[in-house]
Amino acid sequence: MLHQIIASLLLFACLSNIGSAKQIVHEYRLANGMKILVKEDHRAPVVVSQVWYKVGSSYEHNGITGVSHTLEHMMFKGTPKIPKGQFSRIISENGGSQNAFTSRDYTVYFQSLEKSRLPISIELEADRMRNLILDEQEFEKERQVVLEERRMRTDDKPRSKVYELFMAMAYASSNYRYPVIGWPDDIKELSIEDHRNWYNQWYYPNNATLVVVGDVDPDNIFRLAKQYFGPIQPHQLPVVKTSGEVQQYGTKRIQVTLPAKLPYLLMGYKVPVLNTLDESQQWEAYALEVLAGILDGGESARFSSKLVRGQQIAVSAGAGYDMGARLPSLFLIDATPSAGVSLEDLEQAIREQIKLLKTTLVTPEELSRVKAQVIANKVYQRDSLFYQAMQLGSLETVGLGWRVGEQYLDRIKTVTAGQIQEVAKKYLSDQSLNIAYMTLPESNNDTSKESKQ
Amino acid sequence: MMQMFKSRIPAIRLLLGVILAGLLTPATSAVKIQHWTTAQGVPVYYAHAPGIPMVDVQVVFDAGSARDGDQYGLAAMTTAVLDKGAGPWNADQISQRLESGGAILGVSASDDMAALSFRSLTDPEILDSVIQTASTILAEPTFSDQDFNRVKKRVLANLKHELEQPGSIAQKQFNAAIYGSHPYAHPSNGTMDSVKALHRDDLVAFHKRYFVSANALVVIVGDVSRKQSESIANRLLEKLDKGTKPGPIPLVSDNVKGHMIQHQFASEQTHAVVGMPVLSRHDPDYFTLYVGNHILGGSGLVSRISQEVREKRGLAYSAYSYFSPGKRKGPFIMGFQTRNEQAQEALKVLNATLDTYRKNGPTEKELESSKKNITGGFVLRIDSNSEIANYIAMIAYYGLKLDYLDTFNKKIDGVTVDMIKQAFQKRLDPNKFATVLVGQQEAQKQN
């Protein structure tokens, strides 16, 4: 049994005397391979508990896309010990709130509770890790629920739909091309057997991490975990193939016409992430992170000050980069043109901003502003137990390890203007660019009828 | 998952859009609210929250869209332009001043209130600068033509964007139907026509009338002392005109007629919104209706509506009910989204669920379970500084008692099955409901 306690220190040096905060993460591993991370926060007598499984849509393949997500729904349908509906009811009667979510790289189940109720959630999660009843009739109903969820989240939302189609175009071979909720035809054709297979491949302690943050005693959590998860047998997991992305050799474009009211632009450059960079190259991910802040880190950032206020070419423009993804990802830009501005002109204005990053060093003021925001946000994040647990769980589950979060601030602080220019030149190139235009149909008519009851 | 009661408090704009968890013992809230009045007569509400070197501040005005008059969207537009230029600074300079210290500031308007909120580190140099910036924004906004015209275009674009969202269309038509000529009837961000008709001078006049110390209150939660908080409040408000309190918002008429509105929209799903105006923050039935709704449609998957519509029949991903209490009667709302063909079926199930509930009330067991969830989970409601600040702003704005959080569980425990049954029979009248369906519907005959 491996039992280690790692104390780490988060220092908020520089930027005057913000003071230092000592936050300890306790790490344990059960004999069956399950990992447990505990972070104490004694501000209130509450606790957040999350179970993270290393499986999500990027583990799927054509034909079964969406199975991770529908299985997540089925996880509430009962076990021999806890019949259908009882999981939600028990947590509710214990004053808790709970839910689950699926993403590209993980499936997560969580509860928030008054601290004395934590054993209940651990017991229930351990029970459904291996004892789920996968009933065909229940699944048929849930399939309809998930199809409604898809209609609500994607099919009736033009921007979500264009995002989905954009991803499927941008990634030629990477599993990031699949929507998390799955393609409609796949959802319609998934079988209960597909769910049994998926459950029996991935839902084991050696593929899971328990993250607990709150007013708790770490050793006590470890004892609870050992008591409930300890007896579950580990299992040989499928070999996860790299499923990387093939080289792109030029700009790819897609034009989508949907019944929307505003045109919309999406751009994405292929970029590496921490997980896929060698240690000596990891600074690139931090530089890309700061670069995103230069473009879109608030009202004073370039997109707001130049495109929205200065040129007034966009009513909104954003940039984002997820350095914590498991697989190589996209540096994303999205924007809505001002009335009368074409998508072509908007794209051109954004390209000018990208070009500027390559030709001219960002100013010391911009760099220090982004770093100040990162430092402040690190403090603000401590107001949310859920967010803290999310950070530990996601880093651990994509394979980076939670300690990467502890280094984040120091690594961001070392980013230089020269490095930002270097990653801009290296990665924000036409060769790896993907663009989607959402244009509007010629006309659409809505009418309203009223009758008095 | 659905909220049980939709807050009318404008939330602080946070960078982390996450679900929050945890705080404080079940017996008492342990949120100690201190209250005083500044030299200019502005009430201040403060809770000390040590542990994280940051502070959340809200300056709240009785200046929501209920004060728009016939210029729909005026309050929202005033707040949207407010922080784009003030004193000697333009929008670039203001945002640089705030963001160079990592501060987050937002200004917003809901039906009832307008608020400037910020979150800052407590480092004195940073906080001083943020307070100076915020106080100048409140008292000396520039409202330049350039900023006004740009923001107006953005607001018009947002209104247009909402026209591609069936849920948003349904909500607006519902409010228009149930509120008639009351100021709650129009959308806070106005309409295309009303926003186009606004002038810069309208914003100047709205600000001059409503952004005054006689109409303000301040909420401070964070790692700052009482003495520091006194100074923060004084400095934030020192430049504001004294002004006068506006008159009361009109009462909502009880003379409501039933409506059935079908709005044709090219979506795969039909969005349904059903309900009527019911609940103000001061209603004597407040806690009874709150607990009653928790059982009916406010407790996620275990609620009756979710069980009937989603769990038993697979008709929707989300089906719910909630009260949205305001200064005046806010709406009781039930809703769902489902594919067009089965919208009528889902609507029948929804209405039948309410009818059964009104007729028989909840079971003792349901009531017991809901009470356990609400009181047992009370600590989760005030688990973070941002949530505490929002609660205090709500208590302060609506003039609730300062022990609201301390007595919350006791009031929940006092609710009985009979009280719920009677309140739902007396206060809800399906004949007065507006039913709005947005989607591809065949015209239905009504009797």
Image: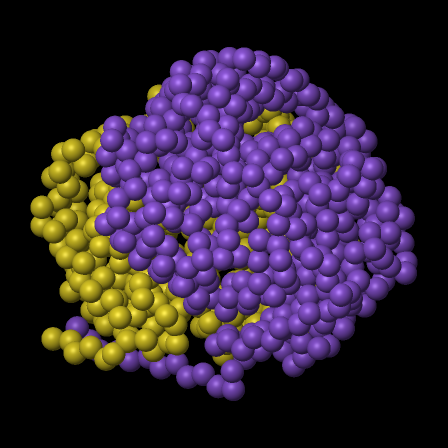
Chain colours: A purple, B yellow
> Where's residue B330, x and y in %?
32, 55
Residue A3 quadrant: top right
- Residue found at x 61% / y 15%: A5
Query: Is residue B12 placed above or below A258 in the rendered structure?
Result: above
Residue A287 location in percent, x, y?
79, 46
Relative to A306, is A394 above or below?
above
Q: Nearer the viewer, residue A14 or A219?
A: A219
Q: Position of residue A73 (x, y in %)?
A: 36, 45
Q: Which of the pair B244/A192 is nearer the observer?
A: A192
Q: Is residue A67 left or right of residue A74?
A: right
User: Which residue is at 45% across, 38% downward?
Assistant: A201
User: In this image, B109 relative to A363: left or right?
Assistant: left
Residue B400 shows in the view:
no
Q: Please give the count of numbered marks on the rendered protein.
A: 0
Q: Nearer the viewer, residue B7 or B302?
A: B302
**Residue A99 location, quadrant:** top left
Q: Does residue A128 lie above or below B161 as drawn?
A: above
- Give me the residue at 76% from left, 73% from top: A348
Q: Residue furthest bottom?
A: A442
Quarter-wise, where is residue B400 in the image?
top left
